[in-house]
Amino acid sequence: MELLRQIFWEPFETMYALPDLLLQTLWEGFVSGTLYSLIALGFVLIFKASGVFNFAQGIMVVFAALALVGIHALGVPPYLALLLTLGVMALLAITVVRVVLKPLVNQPDIILFMSTIGVTFILIAGGQLIFGGEPKAMITEELGLPTGASDWEVGGGLVIFQHIDIAAAIIAVILIAGLAIFFNKTKVGRALRAVADDHQAALSVGISLEYIWVVVWFAAGVVALTAGILWAAKSDVSFALQVIALKALPVLVLGGFTSIPGAIIGGLIIGIGEKLFDLYWGAPILGGGTESWFAFIIALIFLLYRPEGLFGEKLIERI
Amino acid sequence: MLKKLVLGAAALAVAGSMMHVPTASAEDTLFVPSLSYRTGPFAGGGIPIANGFADYFAMLNERDGGIGGARVIVEECETGYNAQKGVECYEATKGKGALVYNPYSTGITLQLVPKAPVDQIPVLSMGYGLSAAAIGEKFPWTFNYPASYWSQMTSILDYIDQNGGIKGKKIGFIYLDVGYGKEPIPLLEKLAPKLGFEWVGFPVGVKEMQNQSATWLNVRKERPDWMIMWGWGAMNPTAVKEAAKIRFPMDKFIGNWWAGAHADLDSVGETGKGYLSSNFSGVGTDFPALQDVMKYVVDAGKSQAEKDDVGNVLYNRGLFNAVIIAEAIRAAQAETGKKAITGADMRLGLEKFDLSEARLKEIGLEGFTAPIKASCADHEGAGAIFIQQWDGSNWNRISDLIPPNTEVVKPLLEEAAEKYVSEQTGWQTQTCG
Amino acid sequence: MFYREAGQFKTTYAADSAHFPIFQDKAFIWLYLAIGFIAVPLFADDFFLGAIMIPFLVFTLAAMGLNILTGFTGQISLGSGAFMGVGAYACYKMTLAFPEVNIILLIFLSGFFSAAVGVFFGLPSLRIKGFYLVVTTLAAQFFLEWAFIRIPWLYNYNDSGAIEVPQREAFGIIVTGANASPVTQYLVCLAIVVVMTWIASNIISGRIGRSWMMIRDMDIAAELMGVRPLYAKLSSFAVSSFYCGVAGAMMVFLWLGAAEVESFDYNHSFEILFMVILGGLGSLLGCFLGAAIIWILPVIIRAVLPPTVDFITPFTINSAQADLVSDIIIGTMIVVFLIMEPLGLARLWAIVKQKLRVWPFPY
């Protein structure tokens, strides 16, 4: 009885009593949601174009942020450092495609997946060897990202909007929109969709697979850099950051592996859902710390009812 | 050419593996393994500690030719804060005549505690590990100077009491959701009714270290008067930033001694101004011993540390660990009359260990830390801590030494030690004086 | 030349379906067993046993568990680390409740607990497969990790949240705890692994194993031929988790001696998957080879690299850098192996065997 009350009554009572907290939670959930979407987007891009489930996306986030901070630390001006980091990510994309993926064409999915885990090992160890293992501060102010906060009074309380969070949401939205336009309206984008539909047909009309792959891996690198900057501004650049990327997996399940709008909506659902759940149900009933699995359990339940995801393009083969 | 290279590599591989054949420690050397972590998610803390630890011994070797005429050999072994590599490091180094182990990880400490009596090598978990190890009768081979987590918690609560009283207050306890962070919870449970405060726990999962906004929303909901943090690694800067985001007053937010380093707050900067943390080792280089380290080691280019990092909180922590070992070695040498001692002698030295004010002055660390005196029964030394405050760019000491509330902690420690021993069969205990 | 089966006639069905049909294979197996049971304990030191051989055996067993699921049934799982944890916690609770019972028996029994948990989390596999299944098994991994922390009963309300292995005996000999000699622990591990390998080999070549492989190769065809996916998949999850559970109990009781939840985290699930893939999907021999290359090679690199670099170059590298270099080497090796021989080391061994058979002729 007490438990039922805790599940069905008290959370809503708290929500009603503290509307500012509820709004704040929704806002925080929205901000993390956009960042989850951004990371999931990196997965979707690569999965669409090459059928590779890119496990290295997480470490790419850390690596990009580290490269940016590391290059800046050499005395390079911030925006130039940003450009150089983009160059590093492009180089990484070319290397991965040339050295790892191209020889593995036509191998089963699991082999391609494992090869990206190999890349992850190399990037984690290489990143620490080059840049050192200690955490570093993100160059937020140097990049012209805003700091500070604005308040909004609601129902006797405050909702605090961090400017960096607002900026993060805006940047994420712009990037997502830009990528959507790029892949829907440009020639490269059409080629990419052709590759996603059918490798062989695309090859036969003269589309270079390798070129398309480099483009998507670079796009995933840009997404990783953006996610890295925005997330590191909230804490710092350290190797612990890469686990955040695992959060993108349930987002993908919710949204479907091949759908860009799915990644966005899925990210928002997971971001807002886990904050609400942890605050109103997880902490009082289960002792907190539920964020580490909530998204995955939601994905699991979701899978049982709708395996193709919210916006999945095709039905998964049922067994 | 290639063949030669391959042959050469194979020969070296054989030579390398031969080095693992256990050898008795040679005359006049003291072998101190350093289980460090310069890689992995907690490298930010592991690097300065390992540097400070190595540099102090390097300085003793350069300046005095070692300790009591015997040179100290420090061998680092990388654990990556990973318990399995920790065991590997232990097995790899114990045969070389290791005197004492400093695992710098609660997980590895727990694995080594039962091994210590068997291999006759003491474990010194300085300010971490098993709190109950403070009871020397039950844990003859484990030491946790200068204070256990529980003792530290009573000191922090004492500080809160001194600054506005603790009765009727609500205290939030944010902790890394592993063994280390959970350690003080039994103490809070026991003390809350006794001292008349209320407490709420906020766990932060290892995977969520940098994703704490839900945790801090919860803090906002609970509205505690004070926050205490048991954090490590990337959790610390994130927590301070999130606290600033919800406008939690920084001077009511106290980290433990692993949550108050330069590495943690440098990336937070001005935002973290006013944040408090406990500490037991001095900050800065204004001590003669540290000047010697600068002169003999760092300036001579024999250190892995950047010059700016010398004197920061965790560097000095690692250095202080080395000081304790060096002093215990001296005590053991005095006790046994040998130059090259063994692990068992080292244990005696750690029990006879007495770091008095006078001795601190002698070794050039006056005012660096509270005096510690250990005994057969007391393996934590009940050292006092002080509170330091972040001013936006550096740590400043703001309180006097706060001794732990031994009366409260002692029975709890004894109870926990009793429980540990009761679950083991054939556990070796000792009786003291 | 060396692996000629000419002149070795099989006169019964039993001989034809034997595990090692050729004399040379039999001889090798007896040789390996002799090395494992006699030579290693005689000559090895504590480092070799405690840091190389025991973990190697533990991971071999875990890899075998995952290989049953992934290699033989075609279901990818990233929950093996957590299933190992279930076995370890089950063994801990049982030995506290029944301190008198032979610990080796308890290690085996703990496998059943993890089998039950494995079946539960295997249920989604009836509807989904591929990467979607990866996500559900990761859900199991994270949920169980959280449960290991949040349910204090599991670690007996220990203040530090860890399980500490008490001293236990089997047949009057101390097997667990710090007083157990590494040789004993090694022999117990080896015996368990040998027995469980033998059992696995029999299951796989029997009816159940064949139904797994049918599901793996083409589930719809298997169903048409009368294999029930429900039973085949769930039995595979059960056996797989059983092996992982025993491996987990061995890991904590015979190797680490104490464990926090960190010892069962998702990195271990990945590590075990590496072993399976590098060793060879669908091969028991591959489990041994995979565990050897993923566990033993880095240990050797870490031990040998710093003195080697000191010796042949003017540079020195510290233990941390050696660790990172070994990670880079492992990562590179994974990629190179996948490109050169996606079927794993076991396939490489099969090629070598074939070459030996026809040597000195090309074919």
Image: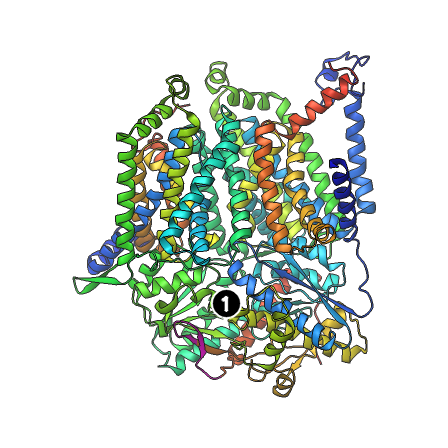
Colour convention: rainbow
Q: Where is residue B413 in the image (x, y as percent from the top left)?
A: 56, 72
Amino acid under disc 1: Trp
Crowd band around label 1 with a 10 angstrom C-alpha radius: few (<14), some (14–19), many (20+): many
Q: In which quarter of the image is the C terminus of chain C?
A: top right
Nearer-the-camera pick, C262 or A117: A117
Q: In which quarter of the image is the N terminus of chain C?
A: top right
Judging by the rendered image, the residue that carries numbered circle 1 is B258
Q: Where is residue C114 in the image (x, y as percent from the top left)?
A: 54, 41
The vertical placement of C158 against C356, above or below, is below
Nearer-the-camera pick, B185 or C8: C8
Query: Taking B264 as reference, is A257 left or right?
Result: left
Q: Can residue C258 be seen in this snapshot?
A: no
Query: Taking C25 as reference, is B358 left or right?
Result: left
For mark 1, name the chain.
B
The vertical placement of A14 against C333, above or below, is below
Q: Position of residue A29 (x, y in %)?
A: 29, 51
Q: Quadrant of residue C57?
A: top right
Residue that extends furthest to the bottom in the rendered view of this protein: B358
Nearer-the-camera pick, A51 or B228: A51
Instruction: State which region is magenta.
Output: B389-400
Q: Check disc 1 and report its element: helix, strand or loop.
A: loop
Q: Where is residue B316 in the image (x, y as percent from the top left)?
A: 56, 72
